């Protein structure tokens, strides 16, 4: 199923134009970007979740124990967690505009969820104590990608699992990669710091400290090449 293909194209054009206006008038404050992204995700989020459902059903059934989810947004992943396998979820969501809906979703699914309104690197969670870390379309927007991957590994206990679905850069030399590089400076303003040309999978594979890393790559959701391919899989801490 294609995810609102025409709508995504229109939104991308509007996003680029609006981003230019925001940058030009120096309105690129965190608050404005957060509120704008929250409104956009109200529209786009359900469709993205629907088209990723087969991948999430397969991947997120592995969520167990003490869990931290990076940037859960409105909590769309919670329904894929098995309640009898999860003891507590720490939801690290720095976008405060998303907290009301995130809190409501947590109550609806019946999980024990603690919402932390801070950047991942400032969350002060106990290191080496988590069974599972979940990241779904989030690492594109962290301030320090390598630092965030290092921190994910630090927070996991030995044998703990990092589960992820992320969009990444197109191969070098392709037309889509050129387009990603051109639009990226503007895209991040409208997308709450989302950057479309990150090589997350390559960095993850190159890290020391994993016992096993499994990464699949596909053009998921039938969307445009700016936000594809998407990688998904797991990494187990040594």
Image (cartoon, rainbow, N blue to C red):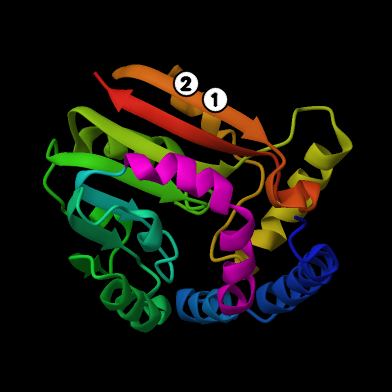
Residue at screen point 70% across, 71% down: 19
The reply to whether callout 2 and callout 1 are in contact (CB within 8 Å) is yes
In-image side of 21 versus 70 (left or right) = right
Q: Residue furthest front?
A: 84
Q: Is residue 185 above or below residue 166?
A: below
Q: Is residue 90 above or below residue 38?
A: above
Residue at screen point 77% across, 57% down: 2
The percent coordinates of residue 36 (x first, y second) are 57, 80
> Distance between the Cα atoms at labels 2 and 1?
5 Å
The percent coordinates of residue 191 (x first, y second) are 60, 65
| Mark 2, residue position | 205
Q: What SS does tag 2 mark? A: helix
- When asked about the image quadrant of residue 89, the answer is bottom left
Q: What SS does tag 1 mark? A: helix
Residue at screen point 42% across, 35% down: 146
Read off the magenta span.
40-62
- Does residue 207 appear anywhere in the picture? no
| Mark 1, residue position | 202
In-image side of 76 versus 24 (left or right) = left
């Amino acid at each position: 199923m294609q995810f609102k293909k025409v709508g995504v194209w229109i939104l991308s054009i509007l996003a680029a134009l609006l981003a230019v206006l925001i940058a030009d008038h120096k309105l690129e404050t965190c608050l404005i970007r957060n509120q704008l992204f929250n409104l956009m995700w109200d529209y786009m989020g359900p469709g993205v979740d629907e088209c990723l459902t087969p991948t999430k059903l397969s991947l997120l059934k592995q969520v167990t124990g003490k869990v931290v989810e990076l940037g859960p947004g409105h909590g769309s992943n919670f329904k894929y967690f098995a309640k009898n396998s999860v003891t507590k979820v720490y939801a690290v969501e720095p976008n405060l505009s998303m907290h009301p809906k995130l809190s409501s979703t947590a109550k609806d699914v019946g999980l024990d969820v603690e919402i932390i309104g801070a950047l991942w690197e400032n969350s002060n969670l106990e290191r080496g104590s988590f069974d599972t870390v979940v990241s779904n379309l989030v690492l594109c927007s962290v301030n320090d990608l390598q630092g965030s991957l290092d921190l994910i590994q630090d927070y996991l206990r030995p044998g703990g699992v990092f589960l992820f679905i992320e969009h990444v850069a197109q191969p070098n030399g392709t037309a889509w990669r050129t387009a990603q590089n051109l639009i990226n400076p503007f895209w991040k303003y409208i997308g709450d710091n989302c950057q479309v040309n990150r090589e997350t999978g390559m960095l993850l594979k190159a890290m020391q400290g994993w016992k096993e890393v499994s990464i699949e790559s596909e053009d998921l959701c039938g969307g445009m090449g700016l936000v594809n391919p998407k990688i998904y899989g797991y990494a187990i801490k040594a």
